[in-house]
Amino acid sequence: MLLHGDGKTIGEGGSSQDAPPTMHTKQVPMPVCKYEVLDGSPTGPPVYYATVGQMVYHKWTCEAEQTDTFCMIVHSCFVDDGNGERVQLINEKGCALDKYLLTNLEYPGDLIAGREAHVYKYADRDNMYFDCQITLRIKEPGAEYCEVSPH
């Protein structure tokens, strides 16, 4: 039988070393993300109707309760005419596939991505639908910036 310094029994064949520290975990709420089309710049007003050739800014943002915790990457973006005609604009690694439609996105912050582009449309279609994926990951401890995949 082994005794701890205060006289308490710690068990047969045990050790008087301290038990490993208890790990405490905390549930962190996931960021809420949105996509906007803005008039001409990252600070422009939202665009609801646009004309072909108009300069717009495609902007993806995520808001998190805790700062400096998450990084985002926008990837796997498609544009759809609403009738099943889909064209991929950004691949699964976040790289632009057609520089005439949309070039590689800029990441001015950990949870902000965007790029200027001219409005275009499908022939005989009035609407276009954008479908993109956003991957969120934990920011490396002590990192000043998020690492974005090389394009």
Image (cartoon, grey):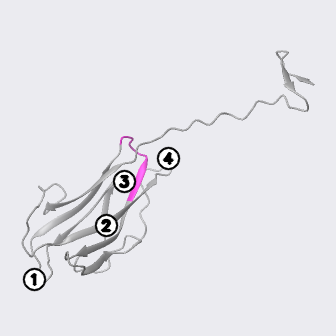
- Closer to the camera: disc 1 or disc 2? 1
From the image, which quarter does the C terminus lie in?
bottom left
Mark 2–mark 3 CB contact (< 8 Å):
no
| Mark 4 lies on residue | 142
Query: Disc 1 versus disc 4: distance between alpha carbons?
Result: 52 Å
Mark 2 vs mark 3, CA separation in Å: 17 Å
Residue bearing the label numbered 1: 124
Closer to the chain start, of discs 3 and 4, is: 3
Crowding at mark 3 (Cα within 10 Å: few <14, some 14-19, many 20+): many
Q: Amino acid at mark 2?
A: Cys
The image position of residue 89, as x and y in percent, is: 29, 76
Q: Earlier in the sequence, mark 4 or mark 2?
A: 2
- Between the residue at mark 4 and the residue at mark 2, the CA separation in whole angstroms equals 29 Å
Q: Nearer the viewer, residue 151 or 34?
A: 34
Which mark is nearer the camera, 2 or 3? 2
Q: Nearer the viewer, mark 3 or mark 4?
A: 3
- Residue 103, can we see it? no
**Dot 1, how many residues are within 10 Å of its Cα: few (below 14), some (14-19), or many (20+)?**
few
Q: Specify start and end residues of the magenta stretch as a single range.
A: 65-72
Helix, strand or loop at disc 2?
strand
Q: Residue at x 41, y 71 (%)?
A: 93
Q: Is residue 68 magenta?
A: yes
Check disc 3 and report the residue beneath it. 110
